[in-house]
Amino acid sequence: MMPPAATATGQPPRKSDSQHDGRKTNSTDDCKQKHKSWSKVKKLCFAAWLSFISVVLFLNIRLYTASPLAADTQHPPSTLLLQLNANRTALDANAASQMQQFFPEGYYFSYLFHGLTWVELAMRDPQYSAEAIKQAEWCLGHLDSPQGKAPFSKQLPPDHGMFYSAWKCHLLAGIATINKGKDRAQVQRLRTECDALSNAIQNSSTPFLPSYTASAWPCDSIPAIHALSTYDRLSNEGRYRDVVAGWLTAAARRLDPETGLLPHTADANDGRKVSVARATSQVIMLRLLPDIDATFARDQYSLFRERFFTTFFGAPCVLEYPSGISGSGDVDSGPLIFGRSLSATVLMMGVAQIYGDMEFANAIGQTGETAGLPWTSAEQKHYMAGVLPIGDIMVAYAHVARPWFSSDQHHPETEYPVAPSWRMAAHCFLLLVFLPLALPLSRRYLRKSAGQIAPTHQ
């Protein structure tokens, strides 16, 4: 057996030295392993960052996509039929019942807005009148169904409360309008419904009749007044002229003192105790007012612009509560984003084009084509993958908005200015996202470039 090799001092190597060398080797291996793991983490973070930048860059570019709105009220929006096809498919798949789980009028609004969208499409292009009447009648049948009436009390006048009767009559008036009053049975049915509304209004101590027990929203009475005005225009009878004039006078005495606008809610007894105006109801009322009283509509819209128009990351939108007043979202508005109402902003797109504020309307439309992530196939168009059908239905209703009779008497004297650079805030956000990655990469590139330049010696 050979003896251990001698060291430089003539002594055999000690066992502790070999153990120390082993620990060093193990430590080195651990460091290499940790370095490899850390490199993988950095690569994953880098890939995630690049993906995030790509998404933000894509959305910034999408802001320049064409507006989904038509240039004028005589032509339909280019993708509206695709949207209507998608919405009909959703309704056939029981989407209205699903929306009922989100808010009390989910079922009703789903069919109502789909029917009204068809009505206003036919007003823009009469070639769709026959199909529009068919689709609107189909929607009207669902409003008349037990499920359509279920949320509303049958004891409330004129028939299951003001919300139910007013909107149903409004849709019926739309059908009669695109048929130009030629169907006598339709006109007679409209007259019967309008008589019931007129009698209820005249027998009430408040212009804002309740939609639910002891609960009244002025925006629910506006479709009733619009329906009465529509009948008078179609028949030339002036049958409800005094009722409409009396309602406008009574409503003008019950404006929100804070804003001068029609209030969001009112006392169900006499309507004199009112709440502050809110965008959720204003976008409903402002859409219909031009056909009722163009001057009153213009004044109300001008006041609304002053207190509710705002921006978010540069994109035009509306506040739920007037500027200077804070509040929380509820079942009417849905969740608010720093005080901004998404649902009201969507419907505002339609209201703005009705009042001639096309720059504002188009900017909202372009933002929607960006944030809404629309998907278009050969036959349908969805937003946000169609996960919220009532949202798609509301978007289509906003895209097709137009006055039924008024031309431009209700337009404000000047359009609302939208800065050409409204997208700049989104571009600045992209820059802020990109810089934290760009600066380290730039420094690394500069260091490598400097290292490749060898010093010269004379």
Image (cartoon, grey):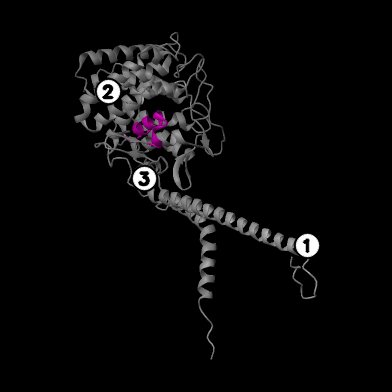
Q: Nearer the viewer, mark 1 or mark 2?
A: 1
Residue at figure coordinates x 50%, y 26% from the top left: 331
Specify the quadrant that holds the N terminus.
Answer: bottom right
> Mark 3 Cα within 10 Å, few/some/many (few <14, many 20+)?
some
Rendering quarter of residue 348? top left
Rendering quarter of residue 109? top left
Q: Which residues are magenta?
A: 383-399
Label ID, residue 359: 3
> Mark 1 Cα within 10 Å, few/some/many (few <14, many 20+)?
few
Sequence-wise, the earlier of marks 1 and 2 is: 1
CB atoms of marks 1 and 3 within 8 Å: no
Q: Main secondary structure of the magenta part?
A: helix
Residue 300 or residue 416, whichever sits in front: 416
Sequence-wise, the earlier of marks 2 and 3 is: 2
In x, y percent, where is residue 393? 36, 30
Q: Nearer the viewer, mark 1 or mark 3?
A: 1
Look at the image and tell me whether residue 425 can be seen. no
Element carrying mark 2: helix
- Residue assigned mark 2: 135
Q: Nearer the viewer, mark 2 or mark 3?
A: 2
Q: How far apart are labels 1 and 2 at the CA level?
A: 91 Å
Look at the image and tell me whether residue 248 can be seen. yes
Label ID, residue 16: 1
Element carrying mark 1: helix
Q: How far apart are labels 2 and 3 at the CA level?
A: 32 Å
